[in-house]
């Protein structure tokens, strides 16, 4: 029953991070161990890595294959069961030194993928009563088999997700490459501010993450705007502005009929990020809640970022001026609920701007 529950719980988790903590927690409980660490092989580096809890946060710890008990198990593929780690020459004290933990008994078994290749190591520490016996070892091996397949799935899923997000991000780069002095920074801002806002507005985690990755695509339609307009150093003529105002439509055409949730969201943002709350925006003159919330968010974020940074056609505004303008436009350009949320997020926005200020310091001084 325990096994069925274990399998059920962990197979529904596709995020590697969450999965690893879930596995550790379940295994600790099932085998009455004080700790459980899951080490995974990093094949590019011939290392094992694991996350360790440190104070309030966590830290990724890396050890060379072959080092310590975990390294030994990964390398040889055999299990290790010891009563007193400090009397075993294979034991590496690195982890204990970092965490301040005192390891006594250790039971470690290999995690293998479908083809029997080393995926990592399962280690449990300090049995609550006595030391680990053969029954524990057999049980841990079974749990390891179940965990390995869940981990493999999560890794596949993660890779897929990563390549998907990376492609989307590169696409956004292409879109913004011509008219931004620092494209990466602009995209990072849009992405981070939008996610912060979505969270502030109480949207669920999954949606927040989708907005984080979809928002940088809002101006993708600008690729279809000629240089003579997009890069014009001065004010646009009315005709030029009319052409410019087509970029949400171009963007929506590029993104329409997408199959993934993320690109569908990106499409809703691209088409509506210049709509105004009072109906005076473009291209459709939507008003209020006719404008999807995600587009109302990106609208605020986009204008904030446009005002606080230099563009080919304008200088950067000060933060004070910008916030005053945003507040002034609440209910006109912007949804008051979203403007309020933005103002509540001022400390986080400031932190991002300060972070950036540090990261552009000359090398060696940061
Ligand atoms: P963008 O540079 O990303 O600006 C996005 C939005 O930020 C603008 O949407 C506008 O709502 C706000 N914004 C930017 N700069 C200013 C400003 O100096 N004052 C005020 N009050 N608001 C500002 P908008 O106006 O619909 O423009 C859309 C895009 O059209 C801009 O994106 C930019 O690429 C282009 N654009 C707008 N005006 C000009 C211009 O005078 N010259 C050039 N070369 N491009 C312009
Ligand atoms: C080791 O595997 O030898 C070190 C890691 C630990 O203390 O669990
Ligand atoms: C992304 O990686 O797609 C988001 C942009 C960023 O945070 O740099
Ligand atoms: Fe735009």
Image (cartoon, grey):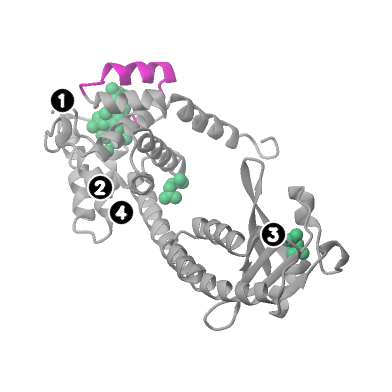
> In the picture, residue 246 is in which quadrant?
top left
Please state which of residues 179 and 77 is positioned toward the viewer in this rendering: 77
Would you call the spot at circle 1 few (<14 residues within 10 Å), some (14-19), or many (20 or more)? some
Residue extending furthest bottom?
Answer: 115
The percent coordinates of residue 64 (x first, y second) are: 73, 66
* Residue 99 vertical placement versus 363 (above, below): below
**Residue 326 inside the magenta-drawn segment:** yes
Secondary structure under tag 3 reads strand
Say which mark, if any, is on residue 35. none
The percent coordinates of residue 208 (x first, y second) are: 36, 44
The residues tagged by marks 4 and 3 sit, at their Cα atoms, a distance apart of 33 Å
Task: Report the residue marked by disc 4.
Answer: 262
Q: Earlier in the sequence, mark 3 or mark 1?
A: 3
* CB-based contact (under 8 Å), mark 1 and mark 2: no
Query: The magenta stretch spans which residues?
Result: 312-332
Which one is in front in this view, the residue at disc 4 or the one at disc 2?
4
Q: Earlier in the sequence, mark 1 or mark 4?
A: 4
* Residue 23 vertical placement versus 200 (above, below): below
The residues tagged by marks 1 and 4 sit, at their Cα atoms, a distance apart of 28 Å
The residues tagged by marks 3 and 2 sit, at their Cα atoms, a distance apart of 43 Å
Query: Residue at (28%, 59%) from the top-left corner?
Result: 260
Say which mark, if any, is on residue 62. 3
Task: Report the residue marked by disc 2.
Answer: 221
Which one is in front in this view, the residue at disc 3 or the one at disc 2?
3
Q: Is ligand 2 closer than 8 angstroms to the Cβ of mark 3? A: no
The percent coordinates of residue 193 (x first, y second) are: 40, 35
């Amino acid at each position: 029953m325990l096994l069925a529950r274990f399998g059920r719980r962990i197979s529904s988790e596709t995020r590697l991070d969450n999965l690893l903590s879930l596995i550790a927690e379940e295994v600790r409980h099932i085998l009455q161990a004080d700790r459980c660490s899951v080490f995974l092989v990093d094949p590019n580096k011939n290392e094992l890595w694991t996350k360790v809890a440190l104070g309030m946060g966590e830290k990724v710890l890396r050890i060379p294959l072959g080092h310590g008990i975990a390294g030994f198990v990964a390398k040889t593929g055999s299990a290790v069961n010891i009563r007193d780690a400090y009397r075993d020459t294979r034991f590496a004290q690195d982890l204990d030194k970092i965490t301040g933990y005192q390891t006594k008994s250790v039971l470690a078994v290999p995690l293998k993928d479908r083809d029997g290749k080393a995926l990592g190591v399962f280690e449990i520490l300090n049995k609550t009563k006595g030391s680990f016996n053969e029954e524990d070892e057999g049980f841990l091996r079974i749990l390891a088999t179940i965990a390995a397949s869940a981990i493999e799935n999560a890794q596949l899923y993660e890779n897929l997700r990563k390549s998907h997000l990376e492609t989307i991000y590169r696409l956004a780069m292409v879109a913004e490459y011509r008219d931004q002095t620092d494209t990466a920074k602009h995209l990072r801002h849009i992405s981070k501010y939008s996610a912060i806002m979505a969270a502030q507005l109480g949207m669920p985690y999954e949606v927040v993450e989708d907005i984080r990755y979809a928002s940088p695509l809002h101006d993708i339609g600008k690729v279809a705007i000629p240089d003579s307009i997009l890069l014009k150093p001065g004010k646009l003529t009315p005709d030029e502005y009319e052409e410019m105002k087509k970029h949400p439509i171009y963007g929506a055409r590029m993104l329409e009929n997408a199959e993934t949730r993320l690109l569908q969201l990106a499409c809703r943002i691209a088409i509506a990020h210049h709509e105004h709350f009072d109906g005076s925006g473009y291209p459709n003159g939507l008003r209020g809640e006719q404008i999807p919330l995600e587009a109302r968010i990106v609208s605020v974020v986009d204008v904030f970022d446009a005002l606080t940074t230099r563009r080919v056609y304008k200088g950067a505004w000060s933060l004070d001026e910008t916030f005053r303008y945003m507040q002034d436009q609440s209910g006109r350009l912007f949804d008051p609920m979203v403007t309020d949320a933005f103002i509540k997020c001022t400390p986080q926005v400031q932190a991002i701007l300060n972070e950036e200020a540090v990261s552009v310091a000359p090398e060696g001084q940061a």
